[in-house]
Amino acid sequence: MTSMIEPASKNRAQSAAQAQQKRAEMRVRPTAPILPPSNIQGNALTVVIAIMAFLACLTLGGVSMVRSTAASWESQISREITIQIKPDDGLDMEKALTQARDIAMTFVGTKSGQIVDEAATARLLEPWLGSGLDIKELPVPRLVIITIDETNPPDFDAMRSLLKESIPQASLDDHRTWVDRLVSMAHTTVMLGTGVLLLVFIAMVLTVVFATRGALSGNRHIVEVLHFVGAESSFVATEFQKHFLKISLKGSAIGSALAALFFLAAGFLQSRTIATPQTDQATALFGTFSVGALGYLGIFATMIVIALLTTLTARLTVMRTIYEIDTLRSDPTRSDGIAN
């Protein structure tokens, strides 16, 4: 009897071991994402986000460049004054220039004085009168440029009076009128640029919102199925949120990188063509095509804002879709105002 029990127990043990081995060989099938990683709607949304991010970053960099250029203009003008001496019969121009410079340097708040020589004066007039000018044959005023201390400027009225007494042909220009006009123009330009940036950002927001809602409308059936099988609203919203976060980060990164490359390429080309008439005129009007560290930081911040905006839009849209589904299930007659 004992001999019959032993083979039976051995068979059961072998069967259990074989079953355990089979169970051990079973592998859990990897789960696929709820949303496909790439489809037509996702690719279109990536392109839209990239374009809007590029425009927003380009506008931001342009505003930053104009503001820094205007500040540079204001700083350069405000730290210099100009003494102009008109030619007159019997006037020793070189002596008058030296005397005017020495008078200006006696005032507290002046740093240095430079007489603009005949060659430099001729170069200033070359765009209008051509080259090969003989300044001595023309009644051209001569200039003395005085550098002043911006924090402790000299007494301009006293300097003007003393120059007028010593050299009647001399006049002092402290550039206050030009500085006031330049400050007003700079502020107006920055305000206009900020307004353009705001409009571009609003257009970007609306485009991203509608593009995200359009992409989500193509996946509405997925939301319905998940909701009907008992998935919580937060779980469904989180899954869609992750999906659109990847899309928005990809699109905004592409657009921001293209904008940064644009400014880098423009600055490189400007540095390679320096001292040419076209580059000099562009530099005088717009400054250097460089946005600086703050500009690139603003481009990066714009990329993050776009990504967060798209993600938030996706989450709110999913939650609203689930609310609409629940509303239709509770009362099928309430279809007015509910998106299909």
Image (cartoon, rainbow, N blue to C red):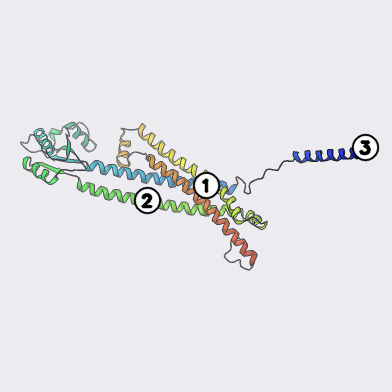
Residue 214 in the image: state x and y as whole percent: 56, 54
Check residue 248 in the rendering and tell me which mark sits there, or answer none: 1
Q: Please say if 202 is above or below 263.
A: below
> Counting residues from the N terminus, which is met first, the one under dot 3 or under dot 2?
3
**x, y percentage for residue 40?**
59, 47
Secondary element under disc 1, as helix, strand or loop, is: helix
**Amino acid found under the numbered disc labelled 2:** Thr
Q: Residue at x 31, y 33 (%)?
A: 276
Work out whether 39 lies above or below 332. above
In the image, is 248 to the left or to the right of 110?
Answer: right
In primary-sequence order, the first of circles 3 and 1 is 3
In this view, 295 is above or below 216: above
Q: Is residue 62 visible?
A: yes
The outermost residue toward the right is 1
Q: Which residue is mark 2?
A: 194
User: Residue visible at 81% across and 38% down?
Assistant: 17
Toward the viewer: 313 or 44? 313
For label 2, count other residues whose C-alpha is less than 10 Å away and answer few (under 14), some (14-19) or many (20+): some
Tally the numbered discs: 3
SS for callout 3: helix
Observer-nearest residue: 66 or 106? 106
Residue highlighted by disc 3: 3
Residue located 85% across and 41% down the image: 12
- The numbered mark at residue 132 is none
